[in-house]
Amino acid sequence: MVKEILLINVSGDDKPGVTSAVTGALAQYGANILDIGQAVIHDTLSLGILAGIPDSVDSGPLLKDILFQMHRLAMQVRFQPVSEESYGHWVAQQGKPRHLVTLLARRIAAGHIGRVTAVCAGHGLNIDKITRLSGRIPLDRIDSHSKACVEFSVRGTPADTGIFRTALLEIAAELDVDIAYQEDTIFRRHRRLVVFDMDSTLIEAEVIDELAKEAGVGTQVATITEAAMRGEIDFQESFRRRVALLEGLDEAVLERVAARLNMTEGAEELISTLHKLGYRTAILSGGFQYFARLIQHKLGIDYVHANELEIIDGKVSGRVTGTIVDGQRKAELLKALAARENVRLEQVVAVGDGANDLPMLSIAGLGIAFRAKPIVRANAKQAISKLGLDGVLYLMGIRDRDMQI
Protein backbone atom coordinates (compact mmCIF):
# COMPACT_ATOMS: atom_id res chain seq x y z
CA MET A 1 0.00 0.00 0.00
CA VAL A 2 1.08 3.58 -0.67
CA LYS A 3 1.59 5.64 2.49
CA GLU A 4 2.65 8.90 0.89
CA ILE A 5 2.49 10.51 -2.55
CA LEU A 6 5.36 12.82 -3.37
CA LEU A 7 5.94 15.19 -6.30
CA ILE A 8 9.65 15.63 -6.98
CA ASN A 9 10.77 18.53 -9.20
CA VAL A 10 14.38 18.72 -10.37
CA SER A 11 15.90 21.56 -12.40
CA GLY A 12 19.32 22.76 -13.51
CA ASP A 13 21.85 22.44 -16.31
CA ASP A 14 21.11 19.39 -18.42
CA LYS A 15 23.61 16.58 -17.98
CA PRO A 16 23.66 12.77 -18.13
CA GLY A 17 22.64 10.78 -15.08
CA VAL A 18 20.07 13.06 -13.43
CA THR A 19 17.00 10.89 -14.07
CA SER A 20 19.01 7.77 -13.28
CA ALA A 21 20.11 9.19 -9.93
CA VAL A 22 16.59 10.12 -8.81
CA THR A 23 14.93 6.89 -9.93
CA GLY A 24 17.81 4.86 -8.54
CA ALA A 25 17.24 6.33 -5.10
CA LEU A 26 13.48 5.74 -5.36
CA ALA A 27 14.10 2.14 -6.44
CA GLN A 28 16.13 1.41 -3.30
CA TYR A 29 13.05 2.24 -1.22
CA GLY A 30 10.58 0.33 -3.42
CA ALA A 31 8.73 3.44 -4.59
CA ASN A 32 6.29 3.35 -7.51
CA ILE A 33 6.39 5.89 -10.34
CA LEU A 34 2.85 7.26 -10.77
CA ASP A 35 3.78 9.89 -13.37
CA ILE A 36 6.94 11.25 -14.95
CA GLY A 37 7.78 14.04 -17.36
CA GLN A 38 10.96 15.69 -18.55
CA ALA A 39 11.78 18.65 -20.80
CA VAL A 40 14.96 20.43 -21.83
CA ILE A 41 14.88 24.07 -22.93
CA HIS A 42 18.15 25.69 -24.00
CA ASP A 43 20.18 23.05 -22.15
CA THR A 44 18.18 23.55 -18.94
CA LEU A 45 16.51 20.43 -17.57
CA SER A 46 13.13 20.26 -15.84
CA LEU A 47 12.23 16.82 -14.46
CA GLY A 48 9.05 15.93 -12.61
CA ILE A 49 8.31 12.61 -10.92
CA LEU A 50 5.16 11.69 -8.99
CA ALA A 51 6.16 8.86 -6.67
CA GLY A 52 4.17 6.57 -4.40
CA ILE A 53 6.04 5.76 -1.19
CA PRO A 54 5.19 2.35 0.38
CA ASP A 55 3.76 2.02 3.91
CA SER A 56 6.90 0.30 5.12
CA VAL A 57 9.22 3.14 4.11
CA ASP A 58 10.30 6.15 6.14
CA SER A 59 10.46 8.93 3.59
CA GLY A 60 13.06 10.93 5.57
CA PRO A 61 16.12 8.89 4.53
CA LEU A 62 14.78 8.70 0.96
CA LEU A 63 14.58 12.49 0.68
CA LYS A 64 18.10 12.82 2.10
CA ASP A 65 19.43 10.39 -0.49
CA ILE A 66 17.80 12.31 -3.35
CA LEU A 67 19.07 15.63 -1.95
CA PHE A 68 22.59 14.21 -1.77
CA GLN A 69 22.46 12.90 -5.33
CA MET A 70 21.13 16.20 -6.69
CA HIS A 71 23.73 18.21 -4.75
CA ARG A 72 26.42 15.99 -6.25
CA LEU A 73 25.09 16.79 -9.72
CA ALA A 74 24.62 20.52 -8.95
CA MET A 75 20.85 20.29 -9.50
CA GLN A 76 18.01 22.00 -7.65
CA VAL A 77 15.30 19.75 -6.18
CA ARG A 78 11.94 20.48 -4.58
CA PHE A 79 9.55 18.06 -2.82
CA GLN A 80 5.81 18.55 -2.58
CA PRO A 81 3.40 16.20 -0.77
CA VAL A 82 0.26 15.31 -2.74
CA SER A 83 -2.96 14.43 -0.93
CA GLU A 84 -5.01 11.37 -1.84
CA GLU A 85 -7.89 13.70 -2.73
CA SER A 86 -5.71 15.68 -5.13
CA TYR A 87 -4.33 12.48 -6.64
CA GLY A 88 -7.85 11.06 -7.05
CA HIS A 89 -8.96 14.22 -8.85
CA TRP A 90 -5.95 13.93 -11.19
CA VAL A 91 -6.76 10.31 -11.97
CA ALA A 92 -10.40 11.24 -12.70
CA GLN A 93 -9.23 13.59 -15.47
CA GLN A 94 -7.99 10.57 -17.40
CA GLY A 95 -9.95 9.90 -20.58
CA LYS A 96 -11.25 13.44 -20.93
CA PRO A 97 -11.13 14.85 -24.48
CA ARG A 98 -7.79 16.20 -25.59
CA HIS A 99 -7.24 18.74 -28.33
CA LEU A 100 -4.30 20.44 -29.97
CA VAL A 101 -3.95 24.15 -30.55
CA THR A 102 -1.21 24.87 -33.09
CA LEU A 103 0.27 28.35 -33.52
CA LEU A 104 2.10 28.98 -36.83
CA ALA A 105 3.89 32.16 -37.92
CA ARG A 106 7.09 33.46 -39.47
CA ARG A 107 8.19 34.24 -35.92
CA ILE A 108 6.43 33.70 -32.60
CA ALA A 109 6.39 36.47 -30.00
CA ALA A 110 5.45 36.29 -26.33
CA GLY A 111 2.30 38.23 -27.16
CA HIS A 112 1.15 35.51 -29.55
CA ILE A 113 1.47 32.80 -26.92
CA GLY A 114 -0.02 35.04 -24.25
CA ARG A 115 -3.17 35.68 -26.28
CA VAL A 116 -3.64 32.03 -27.29
CA THR A 117 -3.16 30.69 -23.78
CA ALA A 118 -5.49 33.35 -22.35
CA VAL A 119 -8.27 32.27 -24.71
CA CYS A 120 -7.69 28.61 -23.79
CA ALA A 121 -7.90 29.42 -20.09
CA GLY A 122 -10.96 31.61 -20.63
CA HIS A 123 -12.79 28.66 -22.18
CA GLY A 124 -11.87 26.24 -19.40
CA LEU A 125 -9.09 24.39 -21.23
CA ASN A 126 -6.06 23.25 -19.27
CA ILE A 127 -2.71 23.17 -21.07
CA ASP A 128 -0.87 19.93 -20.31
CA LYS A 129 2.09 20.31 -22.62
CA ILE A 130 3.71 22.88 -24.91
CA THR A 131 5.99 21.66 -27.70
CA ARG A 132 8.04 23.54 -30.28
CA LEU A 133 7.70 21.76 -33.63
CA SER A 134 9.85 24.14 -35.67
CA GLY A 135 13.63 23.96 -35.67
CA ARG A 136 16.10 26.26 -33.95
CA ILE A 137 16.45 29.50 -35.91
CA PRO A 138 19.60 31.64 -35.71
CA LEU A 139 18.78 35.27 -34.89
CA ASP A 140 20.24 36.48 -38.18
CA ARG A 141 17.96 34.19 -40.23
CA ILE A 142 14.52 35.42 -39.16
CA ASP A 143 13.08 36.66 -42.43
CA SER A 144 10.06 36.41 -44.73
CA HIS A 145 10.70 32.68 -45.23
CA SER A 146 11.27 31.72 -41.60
CA LYS A 147 8.98 29.16 -39.96
CA ALA A 148 7.92 28.97 -36.33
CA CYS A 149 5.40 26.61 -34.77
CA VAL A 150 4.35 25.85 -31.21
CA GLU A 151 1.81 23.15 -30.31
CA PHE A 152 -0.32 23.22 -27.16
CA SER A 153 -1.83 19.98 -25.87
CA VAL A 154 -5.02 20.97 -24.02
CA ARG A 155 -7.44 18.95 -21.90
CA GLY A 156 -11.17 19.50 -21.78
CA THR A 157 -13.86 20.75 -24.13
CA PRO A 158 -15.04 24.38 -24.46
CA ALA A 159 -18.63 25.03 -23.41
CA ASP A 160 -19.21 26.31 -26.95
CA THR A 161 -16.67 25.06 -29.48
CA GLY A 162 -17.95 27.46 -32.15
CA ILE A 163 -17.33 30.51 -29.95
CA PHE A 164 -13.88 29.18 -29.02
CA ARG A 165 -12.92 28.66 -32.67
CA THR A 166 -14.18 32.13 -33.52
CA ALA A 167 -12.04 33.61 -30.75
CA LEU A 168 -8.98 31.84 -32.17
CA LEU A 169 -9.75 33.07 -35.69
CA GLU A 170 -10.10 36.64 -34.44
CA ILE A 171 -6.71 36.44 -32.71
CA ALA A 172 -5.13 34.92 -35.81
CA ALA A 173 -6.43 37.77 -37.98
CA GLU A 174 -5.40 40.43 -35.48
CA LEU A 175 -1.89 39.06 -34.91
CA ASP A 176 -1.29 37.93 -38.52
CA VAL A 177 -0.66 34.30 -37.54
CA ASP A 178 -2.34 30.95 -38.17
CA ILE A 179 -4.01 29.05 -35.32
CA ALA A 180 -5.38 25.52 -35.73
CA TYR A 181 -7.59 23.60 -33.30
CA GLN A 182 -8.06 19.87 -33.76
CA GLU A 183 -8.94 16.80 -31.75
CA ASP A 184 -5.97 14.74 -30.57
CA THR A 185 -6.83 11.21 -31.64
CA ILE A 186 -4.88 8.13 -32.67
CA PHE A 187 -5.71 8.96 -36.30
CA ARG A 188 -3.90 12.26 -36.02
CA ARG A 189 -0.68 10.32 -35.51
CA HIS A 190 -1.45 7.75 -38.19
CA ARG A 191 -2.32 9.64 -41.37
CA ARG A 192 -1.53 7.68 -44.52
CA LEU A 193 -2.81 9.56 -47.57
CA VAL A 194 -2.42 13.26 -48.45
CA VAL A 195 -4.34 14.73 -51.42
CA PHE A 196 -3.84 18.14 -52.98
CA ASP A 197 -5.55 20.56 -55.26
CA MET A 198 -3.06 21.75 -57.88
CA ASP A 199 -3.74 25.32 -59.03
CA SER A 200 -2.89 27.92 -56.35
CA THR A 201 -2.03 25.06 -54.00
CA LEU A 202 0.89 22.99 -55.33
CA ILE A 203 1.63 25.68 -57.91
CA GLU A 204 1.28 29.42 -57.52
CA ALA A 205 -0.83 30.03 -60.64
CA GLU A 206 -4.28 29.18 -61.98
CA VAL A 207 -3.29 27.42 -65.21
CA ILE A 208 -6.52 28.18 -67.00
CA ASP A 209 -5.88 31.89 -66.42
CA GLU A 210 -2.39 31.54 -67.89
CA LEU A 211 -3.78 29.79 -70.96
CA ALA A 212 -6.42 32.48 -71.28
CA LYS A 213 -3.75 35.19 -71.35
CA GLU A 214 -2.10 33.39 -74.24
CA ALA A 215 -5.46 33.19 -76.01
CA GLY A 216 -6.16 36.88 -75.45
CA VAL A 217 -9.17 36.24 -73.20
CA GLY A 218 -7.44 36.66 -69.85
CA THR A 219 -9.81 39.23 -68.38
CA GLN A 220 -12.95 37.28 -69.23
CA VAL A 221 -11.62 34.00 -67.86
CA ALA A 222 -10.13 35.56 -64.71
CA THR A 223 -13.47 37.13 -63.87
CA ILE A 224 -15.23 33.77 -64.16
CA THR A 225 -12.44 32.01 -62.21
CA GLU A 226 -12.67 34.41 -59.28
CA ALA A 227 -16.44 34.05 -59.10
CA ALA A 228 -16.12 30.26 -59.15
CA MET A 229 -13.42 30.18 -56.46
CA ARG A 230 -15.62 32.35 -54.25
CA GLY A 231 -18.45 29.86 -54.74
CA GLU A 232 -20.67 32.31 -56.62
CA ILE A 233 -20.92 30.17 -59.78
CA ASP A 234 -21.33 26.41 -60.08
CA PHE A 235 -17.91 24.97 -60.90
CA GLN A 236 -19.02 22.85 -63.85
CA GLU A 237 -20.81 25.75 -65.48
CA SER A 238 -17.92 28.15 -64.92
CA PHE A 239 -15.41 25.56 -66.09
CA ARG A 240 -17.21 24.90 -69.39
CA ARG A 241 -17.52 28.64 -70.00
CA ARG A 242 -13.83 29.23 -69.39
CA VAL A 243 -12.64 26.28 -71.48
CA ALA A 244 -14.89 27.35 -74.36
CA LEU A 245 -13.04 30.67 -74.46
CA LEU A 246 -9.79 28.77 -75.17
CA GLU A 247 -11.05 27.37 -78.46
CA GLY A 248 -8.43 27.61 -81.23
CA LEU A 249 -5.44 27.94 -78.89
CA ASP A 250 -2.35 26.25 -80.35
CA GLU A 251 -1.28 23.06 -78.53
CA ALA A 252 2.32 24.34 -78.32
CA VAL A 253 1.17 27.03 -75.89
CA LEU A 254 0.67 24.40 -73.18
CA GLU A 255 4.39 23.68 -73.06
CA ARG A 256 5.21 27.38 -72.96
CA VAL A 257 2.84 27.96 -70.03
CA ALA A 258 4.16 24.91 -68.18
CA ALA A 259 7.72 26.26 -68.41
CA ARG A 260 6.84 29.36 -66.41
CA LEU A 261 4.83 27.72 -63.62
CA ASN A 262 6.36 28.06 -60.16
CA MET A 263 5.97 25.60 -57.34
CA THR A 264 4.41 26.99 -54.18
CA GLU A 265 6.77 27.75 -51.30
CA GLY A 266 7.39 24.56 -49.34
CA ALA A 267 5.71 22.20 -51.84
CA GLU A 268 8.82 20.24 -52.76
CA GLU A 269 9.94 19.96 -49.13
CA LEU A 270 6.48 18.78 -48.09
CA ILE A 271 6.12 16.08 -50.73
CA SER A 272 9.69 14.85 -50.23
CA THR A 273 9.15 14.53 -46.48
CA LEU A 274 5.80 12.77 -46.88
CA HIS A 275 7.33 10.18 -49.21
CA LYS A 276 10.30 9.60 -46.90
CA LEU A 277 7.83 8.93 -44.09
CA GLY A 278 5.83 6.49 -46.19
CA TYR A 279 2.74 8.57 -47.02
CA ARG A 280 0.90 8.21 -50.32
CA THR A 281 0.07 11.39 -52.22
CA ALA A 282 -2.41 12.46 -54.89
CA ILE A 283 -3.40 15.43 -57.02
CA LEU A 284 -7.16 15.92 -57.31
CA SER A 285 -7.46 18.91 -59.58
CA GLY A 286 -10.14 20.85 -61.41
CA GLY A 287 -7.30 21.93 -63.69
CA PHE A 288 -5.80 20.05 -66.62
CA GLN A 289 -4.22 16.61 -66.81
CA TYR A 290 -1.33 17.81 -68.99
CA PHE A 291 0.00 20.06 -66.22
CA ALA A 292 -0.90 17.69 -63.39
CA ARG A 293 1.20 14.97 -65.02
CA LEU A 294 4.19 17.31 -65.21
CA ILE A 295 3.83 18.15 -61.51
CA GLN A 296 3.44 14.45 -60.73
CA HIS A 297 6.70 13.69 -62.52
CA LYS A 298 8.53 16.58 -60.84
CA LEU A 299 7.41 15.77 -57.29
CA GLY A 300 6.85 12.01 -57.49
CA ILE A 301 3.12 12.19 -56.72
CA ASP A 302 1.49 8.74 -56.59
CA TYR A 303 -1.94 9.47 -58.12
CA VAL A 304 -3.31 12.15 -60.44
CA HIS A 305 -6.90 12.97 -61.40
CA ALA A 306 -7.60 16.08 -63.45
CA ASN A 307 -9.52 17.25 -66.54
CA GLU A 308 -8.43 16.17 -70.01
CA LEU A 309 -8.28 19.15 -72.36
CA GLU A 310 -9.45 18.07 -75.82
CA ILE A 311 -6.95 18.73 -78.62
CA ILE A 312 -8.01 18.36 -82.27
CA ASP A 313 -5.51 18.88 -85.11
CA GLY A 314 -3.09 20.62 -82.76
CA LYS A 315 -5.67 23.08 -81.49
CA VAL A 316 -7.68 23.33 -78.27
CA SER A 317 -11.29 22.49 -79.12
CA GLY A 318 -12.81 24.42 -76.25
CA ARG A 319 -14.02 21.22 -74.59
CA VAL A 320 -12.79 18.59 -72.13
CA THR A 321 -13.22 14.84 -72.42
CA GLY A 322 -14.54 12.57 -69.70
CA THR A 323 -16.08 13.48 -66.36
CA ILE A 324 -15.33 16.99 -65.13
CA VAL A 325 -13.40 16.97 -61.86
CA ASP A 326 -15.50 19.34 -59.77
CA GLY A 327 -15.91 19.53 -56.00
CA GLN A 328 -18.17 16.51 -55.72
CA ARG A 329 -15.93 14.48 -58.00
CA LYS A 330 -12.91 15.34 -55.84
CA ALA A 331 -14.71 14.00 -52.78
CA GLU A 332 -15.62 10.81 -54.65
CA LEU A 333 -12.03 10.35 -55.82
CA LEU A 334 -10.72 10.91 -52.30
CA LYS A 335 -13.01 8.17 -50.98
CA ALA A 336 -11.95 5.83 -53.81
CA LEU A 337 -8.24 6.43 -53.14
CA ALA A 338 -8.71 5.85 -49.42
CA ALA A 339 -10.43 2.55 -50.18
CA ARG A 340 -7.68 1.60 -52.62
CA GLU A 341 -5.01 2.34 -50.02
CA ASN A 342 -7.10 0.56 -47.36
CA VAL A 343 -7.16 3.56 -45.01
CA ARG A 344 -10.00 5.28 -43.19
CA LEU A 345 -11.11 8.78 -44.12
CA GLU A 346 -9.81 9.90 -40.71
CA GLN A 347 -6.33 8.99 -41.98
CA VAL A 348 -6.59 11.27 -45.00
CA VAL A 349 -5.28 14.83 -45.25
CA ALA A 350 -6.76 17.11 -47.95
CA VAL A 351 -5.33 20.49 -48.95
CA GLY A 352 -6.91 23.05 -51.27
CA ASP A 353 -7.72 26.72 -51.74
CA GLY A 354 -11.02 27.02 -53.62
CA ALA A 355 -14.72 26.51 -53.04
CA ASN A 356 -14.62 23.38 -55.19
CA ASP A 357 -12.18 21.88 -52.63
CA LEU A 358 -14.59 22.16 -49.71
CA PRO A 359 -16.32 18.78 -50.31
CA MET A 360 -13.03 16.88 -50.03
CA LEU A 361 -11.77 19.07 -47.17
CA SER A 362 -14.95 18.35 -45.22
CA ILE A 363 -14.68 14.54 -45.39
CA ALA A 364 -10.92 14.21 -44.81
CA GLY A 365 -9.69 13.57 -41.29
CA LEU A 366 -7.64 16.75 -41.64
CA GLY A 367 -8.92 19.30 -44.16
CA ILE A 368 -6.66 22.32 -44.68
CA ALA A 369 -7.53 25.48 -46.58
CA PHE A 370 -4.22 26.76 -47.92
CA ARG A 371 -3.91 30.49 -48.67
CA ALA A 372 -7.59 30.21 -49.45
CA LYS A 373 -10.47 32.50 -50.28
CA PRO A 374 -12.43 33.81 -47.24
CA ILE A 375 -15.42 31.50 -47.85
CA VAL A 376 -13.09 28.49 -47.90
CA ARG A 377 -11.18 29.51 -44.75
CA ALA A 378 -14.47 30.05 -42.95
CA ASN A 379 -15.77 26.57 -43.82
CA ALA A 380 -12.61 24.44 -43.68
CA LYS A 381 -11.56 22.61 -40.53
CA GLN A 382 -8.10 24.22 -40.58
CA ALA A 383 -6.34 26.95 -42.53
CA ILE A 384 -2.77 27.99 -43.30
CA SER A 385 -2.13 31.41 -44.80
CA LYS A 386 1.10 32.70 -43.29
CA LEU A 387 3.57 29.88 -44.01
CA GLY A 388 4.48 27.82 -47.06
CA LEU A 389 2.88 24.51 -47.97
CA ASP A 390 5.30 22.61 -45.73
CA GLY A 391 3.43 24.14 -42.79
CA VAL A 392 0.98 21.27 -43.37
CA LEU A 393 3.53 19.01 -41.68
CA TYR A 394 3.13 20.88 -38.40
CA LEU A 395 -0.63 20.25 -38.36
CA MET A 396 0.21 16.57 -38.81
CA GLY A 397 2.46 16.75 -35.73
CA ILE A 398 5.69 16.35 -37.72
CA ARG A 399 8.65 18.33 -36.36
CA ASP A 400 11.40 19.94 -38.39
CA ARG A 401 13.86 17.45 -36.94
CA ASP A 402 11.69 14.60 -38.27
CA MET A 403 12.31 15.94 -41.79
CA GLN A 404 16.07 15.42 -41.52
CA ILE A 405 15.94 11.78 -42.59
Image: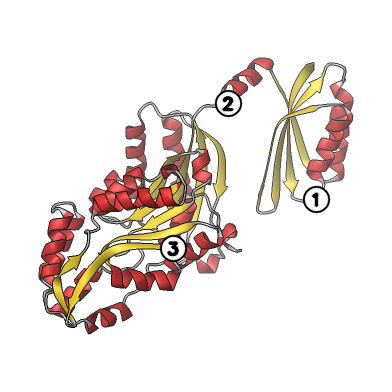
- Does any portion of residue 395 appear in the rendered image? yes
N-terminal label among 2 and 3: 2
For residue 302, the mark is 3
As measured in the structure, the alpha-carbon distance from the residue carrying label 1 to the one carrying label 2 is 32 Å
Residue 236 image position (x, y, % from top left): 16, 56
Residue closer to the observer: 169 or 309: 309
**Dot 2 amino acid type:** Gln
**Residue at point 33%, 53% (across, down):** 333
**Dot 1 amino acid type:** Pro
Which residue, given by chain and number where applicable, does mark 1 sit on? 16
396 relative to 25 in the view: left or right: left
As measured in the structure, the alpha-carbon distance from the residue carrying label 2 to the one carrying label 3 is 40 Å
Residue 245: image quadrant is bottom left
Residue 33: image quadrant is top right
Query: Which of the two marks, 1 or 3, is nearer to us in this view?
Result: 3
**Residue at point 53%, 39% (across, down):** 186
SS at circle 3? loop
Q: Residues within 10 Å of mark 2 (few under 14, many from 20)?
A: few
Q: Looking at the rendering, in which quadrant would you find the C terminus?
A: bottom right
* Residue 219, placed above or below residue 375: below
Which residue, given by chain and number where applicable, does mark 2 sit on? 94
Q: Residues within 10 Å of mark 3 (few under 14, many from 20)?
A: some
N-terminal label among 1 and 3: 1
